[in-house]
Amino acid sequence: MVFTSLPLLIIDFPSYLYKKQAMITFLRDIAGHPRFTQLLISVIVLVLAIALARLVRHMMKKYLDTATQRLNVDATRYNFIRHVLSFAIILSALIIIFYTIPELKSLGLSLFAGAGILAVVIGLASQQAFSNIVSGVFIVIFKPFRVNDNIKVGSLFHGIVEDITLRHTVIRDFENRRIVIPNAVMSEETITNSTLTDEKMCNFLFIGISYDSDIDKAIRIIQEEARKHPHFLDNRSSEDLSLGVPDVVVRVISLGDFSVNLRAGIWTLNHRKGFELKCDLHKSIKERFDREGVEIPFPYRTLVYKKDLPAKASPEAGGDIPNQSL
């Protein structure tokens, strides 16, 4: 097969050399063209900018993780600066590319020269984006919440702040899902921050007992079960100790339709431990109540069927007419 095609290859070799030379000439002409140089510079600038932005983000994240663990540094401001630097690097690269290519430069100048209607369109389109950036700056400056804070946004979202970017805030909820909320929305919502100044938390435990149960015994059981829990924290001050304030304060807060309602205030180091404590105490207190005869009531309803009611007296039967007044 090779020997049969060899003569053809020898005969066609001059044309092959011609095509190769033409390709080399074509590539040389392209490489020497000023547009190719401009395109090559633009690609190189853009690739370097992306690589530099990623390097800056990686280095700052590595430094912040180390500083947060060793020096107990708040990472909120530096995380925001990391996003700002990345954005500035990419924006600078785009500006360089526009100035490198004359057509893009003239296009940019013409757009700025006739920016009447265009400015209005861009202003309306970027109003929300600019609002998010400004809100993000205010969040970083005034710090209503920080990275790693346990917050509740309004009445819907609850979790740990994972990141604050130029546009949005990322919250990791307790199901390990990420909730992305624009910064402008975060600025307008009511934020419940459980870790802004002090992580310690007073957990309210609400329990109802029947009117026949011993209130003092129920209070004693609640206090004993709370003290036994590993997450229980005695948060009394020296003044509270001198006044004899109990470490677990249980109060009768109301007398309901079918129960005496108690509320216990139990302190823990943080919200997570408080949630675990309340779940455990619901179980242990219920078991103690069952063993010691303290009833947790539930509503009783008596159903009376109409057919079982006695026949109404009527005037014909000589009975009295029932009173219809209320």
Image (spheres, rainbow, N blue to C red):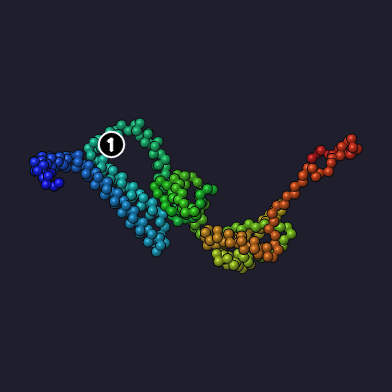
Residue at 36% in and 50% down: 83
Asked where in the image residue 43 lies, by quadrant, the reply is top left
Q: Is residue 125 above or below residue 48?
A: above
Q: Which residue is nearer to you in this view: 307 or 10?
A: 10
Viewed as shown, does residue 29 lie left or right of 75?
Answer: left
Viewed as shown, does residue 169 lie left or right of 41?
Answer: right
- x and y percent of residue 14 in the render? 8, 41
Q: Which residue is nearer to you in this view: 290 or 77?
A: 290
Viewed as shown, does residue 47 lie left or right of 228?
Answer: left
Q: Residues within 10 Å of mark 1 (few under 14, many from 20)?
A: some
Determine the secondary structure under disc 1. helix
- x and y percent of residue 305 in the render? 77, 44
Which residue was labeled with disc 1?
A: 108
Q: Is residue 13 visible?
A: no
What is the count of numbered marks?
1
Residue at 42% in and 42% down: 131
- x and y percent of residue 229 in the render? 58, 66
Q: Amino acid at mark 1?
A: Gly
Q: Which residue is nearer to you in this view: 227 or 311?
A: 311
Q: Is residue 226 visible?
A: yes
View extreme (right): residue: 318
Q: Quadrant of the C terminus?
A: top right
Asked where in the image residue 322 lies, by quadrant, the reply is top right
Residue at 22% in and 44% down: 41
- x and y percent of residue 237 in the render? 57, 65
Residue at 60% in and 64% down: 226
Asked where in the image residue 202 lies, by quadrant, the reply is bottom right
